[in-house]
Amino acid sequence: MTMNRRKKTKRIYIGHIPIGNGAPIAVQSMTNTNTNDIESTVKQIKELKKAGCEIVRVAIPDENAATNFKKIKKEIPEVPLIADIHFDHKLAIKVIESGADGIRINPGNIKKNGIKEIINAAKSASIPIRIGVNAGSLEKDLLKKYAHPTPQALVESAIRNVHFFEDMGFSNIKISIKSSNVLDTIKAYELLSEKTDYPLHLGVTEAGTLISGTIKSAIAIGYLLLKGIGDTFRVSLTRPPVEEVRAAYEILRALNLRHRGPEIISCPTCGRCQIDLFSLVEKVENGLNDVTTSIKVAIMGCVVNGPGEAKEADIGVAGGKGTGILFKKGKLVRKVPEEMLAETLITEVKKMIKEKKNEIF
């Protein structure tokens, strides 16, 4: 299957990060710390940045959090921060004044007069607003009309609110329409993409745990990106947010859209495997966490077929009984004792990356 050409959308900026109109698809996540715990929140944002997260969203549940937002932003001015606002429009006004790079609101739970005040404040600060429509908080009249939060209901809500914003002379907009249902999410974004040229933020809300959430997100987000729909996204997981970022980059890598860090190719193991491959893969993955260069690393359990099966990898190891082999581009380099396989592979990967960089310069 070939990827459809990305739909051309309007360009906005979250801080220094461009969104839409051909810009690289941006990876987002959200802190899960108590925003009033400034130290923990700043620490997590720094961890997210290190993992490759380009835009971070922070929940603002109360006035204290809105006050602390300014202190958080001061600690990490280089990271674009979006303030997540529900119910109380005054919190949005406060964080805009505190230097928020963007605001995310759900029009379904803020009164129109409050939204008007948010729009005016965002217009004065020249920052974008994400119109975030969620299946769980759809406007009452639309729920009555459609009986359920159908894709059509979500899209009608989004377009209605876009028109409201436009009538106020505001077009610095990004849109999301999220459902926990994969097929509804896909259909809603397909419909929305036909009706607007504003940049779209993709995601499956309340996606779930590491496995179920990653699968749901990979199917919905991956399908939409394959169709050329979407300008930025978040993989929502009931896990530490750094894992959301890793999952996001794996989706982008699988679609050949963006590449960051090592791609680990490893076999599922079978009766021929005579080493502890699970532990080996985990050690190597952890040991390469700080690597941002794209490189294919194979970790195979069978010394007979390993190099051949992973010949497209840049470097890798294949295990045997109490030993293994190190290979590059499918060719044997040397034998390595099993207890040294992880350390050897990590060292050789970093050495190879350094050599590649030296060749460039």
Image: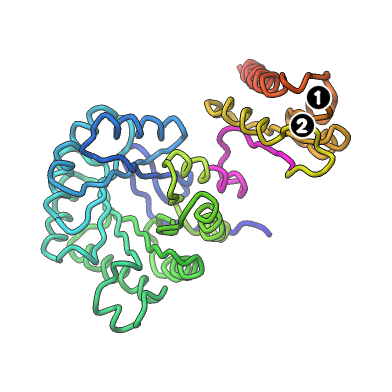
The numbered dot on residue 322 is: 1
- Above or below residue 177? Residue 250 is above
Secondary structure beneath dot 2 equals loop
The residue located at (73%, 30%) in the rendering is: 314
Q: Position of residue 282 (x, y in %)?
A: 62, 33
> Where residue 211 sits: x, y (%)?
55, 52
Q: Which residues are magenta?
A: 249-267
Q: Residues within 10 Å of mark 2 (few under 14, many from 20)?
A: many
Image quarter (top left, top right, bottom left or bottom right) of the N terminus: bottom right
For this view, does 230 lie left or right of residue 345? left
- Whether residue 167 is visible, yes or no, is yes
The CA distance from mark 2 to mark 1 is: 7 Å
Q: Which residue corresponds to the image point at 68% horizontal and 20% vertical from the top-left?
A: 352
Q: Is residue 232 visible?
A: no
- Total numbered circles: 2
Mark positioned earlier in the residue sequence (2 or 1): 2
